[in-house]
Every structure is written in structure tokens, then in C-alpha cells.
Amino acid sequence: RKEVEQDPGPFNVPEGATVAFNCTYSNSASQSFFWYRQDCRKEPKLLMSVYSSGNEDGRFTAQLNRASQYISLLIRDSKLSDSATYLCVAGDSGYALNFGKGTSLLVTP
Amino acid sequence: SAVISQKPSRDICQRGTSLTIQCQVDSQVTMMFWYRQQPGQSLTLIATANQGSEATYESGFVIDKFPISRPNLTFSTLTVSNMSPEDSSIYLCSVPGANYGYTFGSGTRLTVV
């Protein structure tokens, strides 16, 4: 069983829509959680860290539910430039990161 | 956060040969990580490179196939040895960054023919 699982999509949404991505992680000892964004043929770039209290950065909101081992990312007012693959990541105490396969988002005019 | 220079950005290699990938960081970091991202797949950790000691390899990866050097706190190399087409992948180095996130190099896109 893969450690981090997420719906691969693709999610096709119109500009201005709200879209939510979910992922689950299997290792209950995971201690750090992130969402990364990866553009085609580029390296992953940190979008935001995810905290139990939830955190918001502009149009992006991340939530963590430790009891359910579930992480979410909400994107409001989608822009064309949001089109990318979004990687859910869970880190263990040894600094190793476990990546999901990514969820593809395509925002259309 | 740290800035990483990774070279080469891409290469096409003959099977049976070896390729060494370099990562230079603009600041000293204790740990550097090497990942592989196969087509359509997630990133998989190959090994953790620690300065002054041998690299720590993840299950499924061995030193003979992926030797790693870490001569100082700003530099590391990963060699893909005796390559086969199955080694075609993107290889990325990474270092811990701000807010506990990680910064990645721009990646090396390897094609083995």
C-alpha cells in the first residue's frame, strides 16, 4: 500500500471556480505535511506546509486531520496559472518525505 | 531558502555507461537528499547524503548502482552506474528549507538508450 495516496485527476475547472484536493497517508507517525506544486518538466516547489490548526495563504487553504490521516487543499477563485500537478507530502521524523503521485489540475478560460 | 544548482539538466546516455549528477547549494546544509521521479510516478527517495559519513540508502537502492559523494556541506554527487533503459527518469537533489519544507534542484532528465 502506498504511503500517500491522492486522486490523480485530472481536475478540469473553469476560471474562478473553487477546487479541493484530498489525500490520505498511511504512516500515523508522520510529523510534517506539505503541498507541493510541480509544473510540467519542472522541479516540485513548496506551496505550503500543513498544520493541524489549518492554514491559509491567499486563495489556498490547507487542512490536516490527524485522526483520519487526511490532508486537503482548497483553491478558491482558480486562475489559469494554477494549472499544475499538486503533490501531497508526508514527512517522518527522519526527514524523509513521502510523496503522493500528484493530482493534476487544469484551469480553463 | 537555499538555492540549488543541479547539473546536467538533461542527458541521453548509452546503456552500460554511467552518469554523475552534481548539486551545489549556496549555503551549508547537513543533509542532502536524492530523489528519482519516473515517468508518471511520484518522487521516490533514493538516499540521504551526509557529510563525513556514508550515504543512507532506501530499500531498493544500493550503493553499487547509485554511489553518492558528499565531500562538504554544500556539494553532493549522485552517479547512476551501468545504466539501463529502466533508469530513464528525472533525478532531483533536495535540501531542508524554511518552514520545514524542502527545496529541490531543477532536476536531471535522464534518457538511457
Image: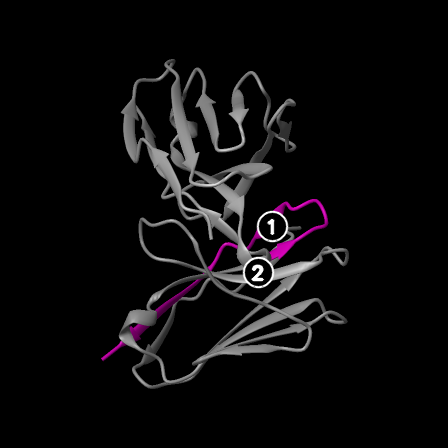
- Asked if the stretch drawn in magenta spans residue A82, the answer is no
Residue A60 lies, in percent from the top left, at 47, 77
The C terminus of chain A: image quadrant: bottom left
Front in this rendered view, residue A84 or B48: B48
Answer left or right for B30 relative to A37.
right
Q: Residue at x 29, y 33 (%)?
A: B10
**Badge 2: how crowded within 10 Å, few (<14), some, or many (20+)?**
few
Give the amino acid at mark 1. Answer: Asn
Q: Give the magenta-colored segment's residue range.
A: A90-109
Front in this rendered view, residue B40 or B74: B74
Q: How far apart are the two marked residues, 1 and 2, measured between alpha carbons?
A: 17 Å
Q: Is residue B101 above or below residue A56?
A: above
Answer left or right for A24 relative to A14.
right
Residue B19 occupies quadrant: top left
For disc 1, the marked residue is: A98
Residue A93 lies, in percent from the top left, at 72, 49
